[in-house]
């Protein structure tokens, strides 16, 4: 079992500090079967994931309300070192309503300008997502504003009646990931890992 701690910060002031760990790091082929390659270190995987997250501000987030009903949305996101993703959306949007029913969510991040015949990069996360509590909003806004410098000015210019006044932040906490980083790990090689958090 490969194990690495890659962050010590977590949550809002007063909250118990947690360690975020990558565990059960494995290498698989495109069909999901084990690959003969030695699993990379957790630090390599973490660096590769951050590289993908930093290359584009957009992600696709998929929600589900029942076993046979899926939905997907595209949105801007920011992220923390422990791989929490922060998204902003209207609570009455279909994807946010689905999260109230079932917080299970999957997220995909990749640079859409990549060429088909060149080495590719992308990451998939699986976990849960909930609306950010009011007490945690300042911390989340700080993370979001760091990536989108125009956010505060945009927020200050909102006028009464604008639907954006009702936007809320959502925190996605993944518990599994699957990354393709061909320049780093090789052609058609996927690295999968579980994400654990312990006190």
Image (cartoon, helix red, strand yellow):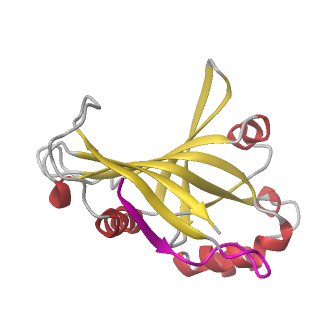
Q: Main secondary structure of the magenta part?
A: loop
Left or right position of 70 against 5: right
Residue 48: name its quadrant: bottom left
- For residue 122, above or below residue 68: below
Left or right position of 123 against 185: right
Left or right position of 185 against 95: left
Q: Residue furthest front?
A: 1
- For residue 130, above or below residue 5: above
Give the image location of residue 27, x and y in percent.
26, 46
Give the image location of residue 132, x and y in percent.
76, 61
- For residue 139, above or below residue 113: below
Left or right position of 124 against 31: right
- Residue at the location (60% across, 27% down)? 70
Q: Nearer the viewer, residue 79 or 71?
A: 79
- Residue at the location (51% across, 75% down)? 7
Give the image location of residue 95, x and y in percent.
68, 40
- Residue at the location (64% across, 47% down)? 128
Q: Residue furthest top?
A: 68
Q: Is residue 15 magenta?
A: yes
| Segment tinted magenta in the rendering | 1-17
Q: Quadrant of the C terminus?
A: bottom right
Q: Nearer the viewer, residue 120 or 7?
A: 7
Give the image location of residue 23, x and y in percent.
43, 55
Q: Nearer the viewer, residue 54 or 126?
A: 126
- For residue 1, above or below residue 152: above
- Residue at the location (60% across, 42% down)? 105
What is the total number of numbered labels drawn onto the structure image? Answer: 0
């Amino acid at each position: 079992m490969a194990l690495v701690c890659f962050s010590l910060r977590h949550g809002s002031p007063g909250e118990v500090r947690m360690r975020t760990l990558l565990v059960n790091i494995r290498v698989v082929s495109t069909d999901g079967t084990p690959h003969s390659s030695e699993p990379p270190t957790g630090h390599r995987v973490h660096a590769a994931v951050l590289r993908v997250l930093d290359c584009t501000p957009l992600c696709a987030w998929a929600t589900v309300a029942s076993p046979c009903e899926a939905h997907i949305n595209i949105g801007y996101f920011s992220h923390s070192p422990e791989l929490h993703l922060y998204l902003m959306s209207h609570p009455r949007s279909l994807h946010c309503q689905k999260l109230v029913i079932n917080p299970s969510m999957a997220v995909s991040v990749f640079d859409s300008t990549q060429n088909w015949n060149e080495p590719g990069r992308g990451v998939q996360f699986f976990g849960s997502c909930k609306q950010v509590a009011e007490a945690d909003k300042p911390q989340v806004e700080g993370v979001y504003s760091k990536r989108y410098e125009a956010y505060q000015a945009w927020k200050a210019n909102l006028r009464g009646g604008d639907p954006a006044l009702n936007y809320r932040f959502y925190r996605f906490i993944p518990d599994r990931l699957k990354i393709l980083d061909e320049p780093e790990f090789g052609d058609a090689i996927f690295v999968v890992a579980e994400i654990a958090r312990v006190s």
